Amino acid sequence: LLRSLGRHEERNPGKNALTEFLRKLSLESSDDEQNEVGDNVILTTLHGSKGLEFPVVFLIGWEEEILPHARSLMPTAADVSDPDHTSDVGEERRLAYVGITRAQRKLYVSRSTARVIRGKQVPRTPSRFLMEIPEELIEERDLASEMEAPVEVSELSAFFSDFLSKD
């Protein structure tokens, strides 16, 4: 973060460098920018998305200990003040449902097969909630193998056309 701030300040010296850097970090756009519908990416939490809908939704991190969160799986978690409610996987399932139902047209759910945790690559277990989605609704893709194959322009066009508003 400090190196990034330093580079930003080198490119944009002056007393407003920090303010501008923080504005960019917060994904805030200036008031005078007029964005067309569909020209924005909205980052939110599952809790924050309640009541909202989007044409295309990406849900990431569908792995055990992320969704459902580790605190809901381990009743002895030290940072939970109410031990009677630490293993409420049902609430985590409801949050997963909230995320899924935010998508109007297209939903992408992803997980990692491994993550770097404390400097070591650790294999990850798919979220139990993925197993509850009917198989006929899932298109499973292995991105590692797809990265080696060339991408056709028509495939890219089709992918990005899903993001255009069809209102």
Image (cartoon, helix red, strand yellow):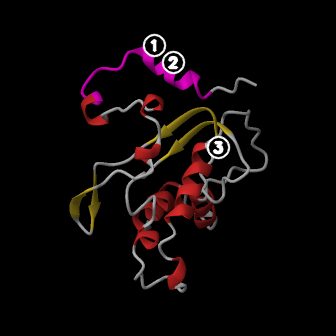
Residue at mark 2: 158
The residue type indicated by label 3 comes to: Arg
Measured Cα–Cα span from mark 3 to mark 2: 22 Å
Residue at mark 1: 154
Q: Quadrant of residue 26?
A: bottom right
Q: Quadrant of the N terminus?
A: bottom left
Q: Residue drawn at (44%, 17%), measured in percent from left and top?
A: 155
Viewer-side residue, 140 vs 156: 140
Q: Residues within 10 Å of mark 1 (few under 14, many from 20)?
A: few
Residue 102, label in figure:
3
Query: In the orientation shown, which residue stands out farthest toward the top?
Result: 154
User: Against 94, is 36 above or below?
Assistant: above
Q: Quadrant of the C terminus?
A: top right
Q: Residue drawn at (42%, 43%), measured in percent from left and top?
A: 110
Viewer-side residue, 147 vs 65: 65
Q: Quadrant of residue 95?
A: bottom right
Left/right of residue 99 with respect to residue 150 in the rendered view: right
* Total tally of numbered discs in the picture: 3
On whether residue 39 falls in the magenta region, the answer is: no
Are the residues flagged by discs 1 and 2 in contact, CB closer than 8 Å?
yes
The residue type indicated by label 2 comes to: Ala
Q: Which residues are magenta?
A: 146-163
Residue 72, label in figure:
none
Q: Quadrant of residue 16?
A: bottom right
User: Percent from the top left, x then y, of residue 67?
Assistant: 45, 58
Measured Cα–Cα span from mark 3 to mark 1: 28 Å
User: Percent from the top left, x then y, of residue 91?
Assistant: 57, 63
Measured Cα–Cα span from mark 1 to mark 2: 6 Å
